[in-house]
Amino acid sequence: MKKILAIGILITLVCGIGLAIAQNQSADVVTSTSLSATGEKNYTYGDENDSKNITKLRQEIEAKMEKLDDRELDLIKGKYDRPPGVKDYEPPKVQMPKPTPPTGLREISPVFTDTSSVSPTHATVSTASSDVRAGYQIFGKWASWMTDKSYLGRVWSRTESVQYLKNDAKEWHVMHQYEADAQSNIKAENAILLMRHDDIATCAPFFSSLGGHQTDDYKYYPANHVISIGIRPEHSSGSRDYNEIYIWIWDRTDDVFWGKTYNLPQTEKITIVDAALECDKNEAPDSQWKNFYKFKPSNEYNQAVNLLDEFTWTEHSSPVFNNEHSEEYYDDYGPNTVATLWQRKTPK
């Protein structure tokens, strides 16, 4: 598979040049956007060893991408709800923890783009929990003025990074699918959270319209396995409306699968998707990169999109750590339709 890297990432890996994430010193929130005119991406790296380390990590991820097939593509398209040949998930025979980290609906104020400058733009983000600090790698049209972006809904990805999350739900990796209105108010939040308890991955579905964390449906896998997750709003081609969501949590290492359809109490509309790395605002950072790879959303026509053009970075800043991120893009059935998304938290 031909690899397409964001220009900023390529500059860093080849030349070792780092660009700092722009920060709004007057608020605890920072946003930067991709600039489609120049192809520029925003990210943060540390010293030369960081560049070498992420290059090595990327190569390891690419090797895993080649070894696993793409049955998720048929899942996300709705060709079936259970991939052929998989093993059914069996719950542990002992009681397992069911952490419920804070989460909830948030609001993203519109970004006012200064067309005379290539500097990152800024926005204000509010969240239901003032204690959560995170970075959000957002894809899609979350503001009415974003006429060049798409409405995105169905999304899937893989990760082998649960083993690197901080223990006992002090840090959690999330894949979100949202409905937002024209004023960027989040109206509905659907997500899968990934947490670690020692050597066990805790995989937690979340639906705002169903009361939040679905604790009866928590699933557990070895934390060092490759885990695939998917969120499939059941909308017809050309429509943004859905009132059912199918999700899956799939241990690709052992081929152990679980999936379920959730009926929602009201109709929602696909708008944006994201990958997030969340934790308490005062949690000590560990500088460890975590990733989602084979991250692939689709629009209301169930078509892949150019993720390089759809990207926005938003963060809740912390008094003790920096949110850092990078994005790498790959071709499959179109340009830049698959991404590997990196995040970490480093000391201030």
Image: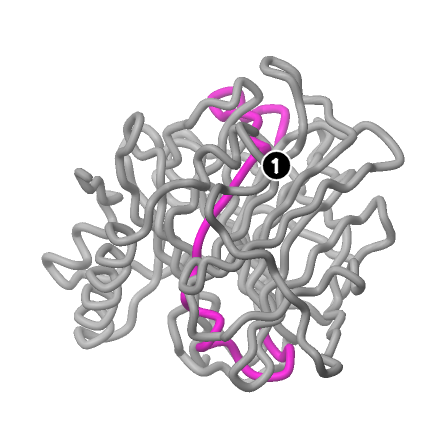
For the image, the number of numbered tags is 1
In the rendered image, residue 222, in percent from the top left (x then y), is placed at 50, 74
* Residue at the (42%, 46%) spot, across then down: 295
In the figure, 241 relative to 166: above or below?
above
Q: Viewed as shown, does residue 312 lie left or right of 174?
A: left
Q: Mark 1, residues whose alpha carbon is within 10 Å: few (<14), some, or many (≥20)?
A: many
Q: Residue furthest top?
A: 238
Instruction: Name which quarter of the figure residue 94 lies in.
Output: bottom right
Residue receiving disc 1: 232
Quadrant location of the C terminus in the rendered image: bottom left
**Depth check: 109 or 250 in front?**
250
Instruction: Name which quarter of the figure residue 238 lies in.
Output: top right
* Residue at the (61%, 70%) spot, across then down: 220
In the rendered image, residue 291, in percent from the top left (x then y), is placed at 41, 61
In the figure, 200 relative to 85: above or below?
below
In the rendered image, residue 178, in percent from the top left (x then y), is placed at 67, 40
Is residue 278 magenta-colored? no
In the rendered image, residue 85, in percent from the top left (x then y), is placed at 46, 47
Q: Viewed as shown, does residue 163 lie left or right of 315?
A: left
Quadrant location of the N terminus in the rendered image: top left
* Residue at the (89%, 36%) spot, across then down: 265
Element type where label 1 sits in the image: strand
Question: Magenta segment range?
Answer: 143-171
Residue 23 appears in view: no
Residue type at numbered disc 1: Arg
Residue 97 appears in view: yes
Instruction: Name which quarter of the figure residue 60 lies in.
Output: bottom left
Q: Viewed as shown, does residue 52 lie left or right of 333?
A: left
* Residue at the (38%, 44%) spot, across then down: 119
Is residue 167 magenta-colored? yes
